[in-house]
Amino acid sequence: MTSASLVPAPVTARVPAKVNLELLVGPRLDDGYHALSTVFQAVSLYDDVTVAAAEEWGVSVHGPLAHGVPENADNLAMRAARLVDARFDVEPVHISIRKGIPVAGGMAGGSADAAATLVALDHLWELGLDREELEELASQLGSDVPFLVAGGTAVGSGRGELLAPVLARGTYHWVFALAEGGLPTPAVYAECDRLRGSTPVPDPVANPALMSALRSGDPHELAPQLANDLQDAALSLRPDLGEVLSAGMEYGALGGIVSGSGPTTAFLVEDNEAGIDLAVALTASGVVRDVRRASGPVHGAHVIHHRVD
Ligand SMILES: C[C@@](CO)(OP(=O)(O)O)[C@H](O)COP(=O)(O)OP(=O)(O)OC[C@H]1O[C@@H](n2ccc(N)nc2=O)[C@H](O)[C@@H]1O
Ligand SMILES: Nc1ncnc2c1ncn2[C@@H]1O[C@H](COP(=O)(O)OP(=O)(O)O)[C@@H](O)[C@H]1O
């Protein structure tokens, strides 16, 4: 056997974006984070993350949405790789990311890449991590990362990292309106605090009507239950999003909401055809520069490609 044959073949993991069907933000805690009750759904906009054995650690980012993503140690995928290295002392890899998830858009693209890197490295270096170990590593990388490992539909509590599955029937169809520029998550939480001032904030509790809507599988039942406590803050920082939300509802969405910390807006529609109609209407209106259609729930980070040369 030659030494070249000992180098493992590159591994690609595919990872979805998320939308928060409900994002209830509780009081600011002493560590600066906020207690959350959130219902995540994984949707079919994907990043593909390939890890390949290399002489030294590195990361590169590709595709039309790659602009503004760091190609250095600040990349969340690289932080995930260094965490795995610190724990398991693995050989270096080059990470190549193909972005299909809007950047800094409130759809957890960076967290998704961290989740995909954990899953891909587990496969490449045959670490044999179980789900619990993966989620524990994920929670060290960010509040949203465990959900991007898990996928599906789930309730997140704590900082968003403590997950419980939700019984959701059916498939939901979404149109996402992409916005120019991004919104930094910490700035949106800070604006939420500023708007609340000294008003006492109760601990957040998941809304039973949302859970029952998800069990029904009916988008008409789900639409009125969509809720986002960060929406006012996102609109305060980006007033133009109000016009996008109004346009989406006017052109036939069942419900519309800012996705997480924004500035992407998410519209729930009746079915695939309604999604095509809304995407066309929003683009033609000139209010929205770019749209993506997606459906959910879908699986979390998973290996799609293990090349054998
Ligand atoms: C708002 C949400 C909704 O799912 O995501 P995005 O919409 O940005 O993707 C999340 O709460 C973001 O999760 P994530 O982006 O993983 O957050 P982290 O890296 O852990 O934290 C980034 C910053 O967000 C704020 N933060 C985050 C989570 C939380 N429960 N309370 C907070 O106040 C803090 O200011 C923190 O410094
Ligand atoms: N792999 C990555 N993909 C996207 N952004 C990343 C990544 N790694 C680090 N970042 C940084 O994280 C910021 C937030 O990006 P992202 O996770 O896409 O947004 P959000 O937190 O709104 O969901 C970006 O502006 C970028 O500087």
Image (cartoon, rainbow, N blue to C red):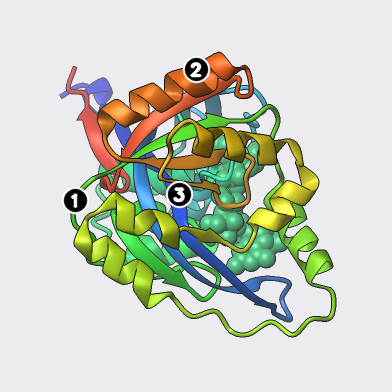
Q: In which image quadrant can residue 252 be found?
A: top left
As shown in the figure, which amino acid type bears the numbered disc 3?
Val
The residue at label 2 has a CB less than 8 Å from ligand 2? no
Residue 193: give x, y in percent of width and height: 78, 68
Question: Which residue, given by chain and number where applicable, does mark 3 sit on?
Answer: 19
Quadrant location, the N terminus:
top left
Judge the density around disc 1: few (<14), some (14-19), many (≥20) Cα neighbours within 10 Å. Answer: few
Picture quarter with ligand 2: top right
Q: Are marks 1 and 2 in contact (CB under 8 Å)?
A: no
* Mark count: 3
Considering the numbered disc 1 on the image, is that residue within a helix, a strand or a loop?
Answer: loop
Question: Is 186 placed above or below 242 here?
Answer: below
Question: Which residue, given by chain and number where applicable, does mark 2 sit on?
Answer: 63
Question: Which residue, given by chain and number where applicable, does mark 1 sit on?
Answer: 170
Disc on the earlier residue, 3 or 2: 3
Disc on the earlier residue, 1 or 3: 3
Query: How much space separates mark 1 and mark 2, taking CA atoms?
Result: 31 Å
Q: Are marks 3 and 2 in contact (CB under 8 Å)?
A: no
Nearer to us: label 1 or label 3: 1
Q: In which image quadrant can residue 211 be found?
A: bottom left
Q: Are marks 1 and 3 in contact (CB under 8 Å)?
A: no
Query: How much space separates mark 3 and mark 2, taking CA atoms?
Result: 22 Å
Q: Considering depth in this image, is 109 or 118 the residue closer to the camera?
A: 109
Q: Considering depth in this image, is 225 or 261 the residue closer to the camera?
A: 225
Residue 231: give x, y in percent of width and height: 64, 54
Residue 11: give x, y in percent of width and height: 29, 32
Is residue 52 among the parts visible in the rendering?
no
